[in-house]
Amino acid sequence: GAIYAIRSGLFKPIPEETILDDVLIPLNIIQQGYRVIFDSAARALDIVSKDVQSEWKRKVRTLAGNWQLISIAPYLFNPFTNRQWWRLMSHKIFRLLVPFCLPLLFVSSVSSPGLFYKACAVPQAIFYAAVALAWRYPQLQQISIVKLCYFFFMLNMAAVAGFFYWITRRTGKIWS
């Protein structure tokens, strides 16, 4: 998580089950009319995930936390009262919708009449084939473009998994 310092008077208690406290606390400060400043000279050390399973858990937890923000801090999603609304939506929320849009994009490309749409389906089919092959044959992930496709796909699947943790109210069971 982030490292930060705040005036004690600006701290507002957050729900105990909050996953992304390092996001919610600064957003609450902004909601009070104060600024949050990023200091590029600040340094923090973090432990890098050692394997795919550890990275998967981390991403699911973080993305479930993004979903959780919707239910524990609905006031943040009002564009008229949140000065950081666009940043929050574009950096935290809109990307959560991508994994639900990708299959729709593929199905609509395949099922729509016309050469243009069929041509758009080809790279998507290649993408999904590369992901399936990379999953079945992990050594193919040594190829940069295959690794990129696989990573993008897995990141989006982590968002779906995070969604199901949130919607089933099991976000408290993510931490280990």
Image (cartoon, grey):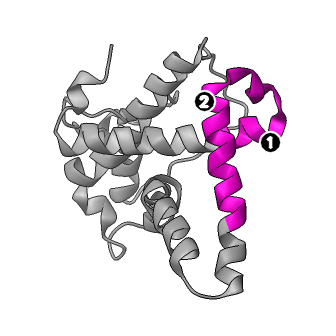
53 left or right of 71 in image = right
Write down the region rendered in magenta.
122-150
Task: Please name the residue shown 46% across and 67% down the image.
Answer: 104
Q: Report the disc number at residue 168.
A: none
Q: Earlier in the sequence, mark 1 or mark 2?
A: 2
Q: Residue 115: horizontal and vertical position, in percent? A: 70, 84
Depth check, front residue: 103 or 100: 103
Identify the element where label 2 is drawn: helix
* The quadrant where residue 66 appears: top left
| Image: 158 above or below 140 | below
Specify the quadrant that holds the C terminus.
top left
Circle 2 residue: 135
Near mark 2 (Cα within 10 A), the count class, few <14, some 14-19 or many ≥20, is some
Task: Please name the residue shown 19% across and 36% down the image.
Answer: 15
| Image: 81 above or below 99 | below
Task: Please name the residue shown 73% across and 31% down the image.
Answer: 41
Task: Please name the residue shown 43% across and 44% down the image.
Answer: 159
Task: Kindly report which numbered mark, 1 or 2, lies closer to the viewer in this rendering.
Answer: 2
Circle 1 residue: 145
Depth check, front residue: 100 or 87: 100
Measured Cα–Cα span from mark 1 to mark 2: 14 Å
Near mark 1 (Cα within 10 A), the count class, few <14, some 14-19 or many ≥20, is few
Q: Is residue 123 magenta?
A: yes
Q: Is residue 6 visible?
A: no
Q: Residue 109: horizontal and vertical position, in percent? A: 58, 74
- Look at the magenta stretch and give its main secondary structure: helix
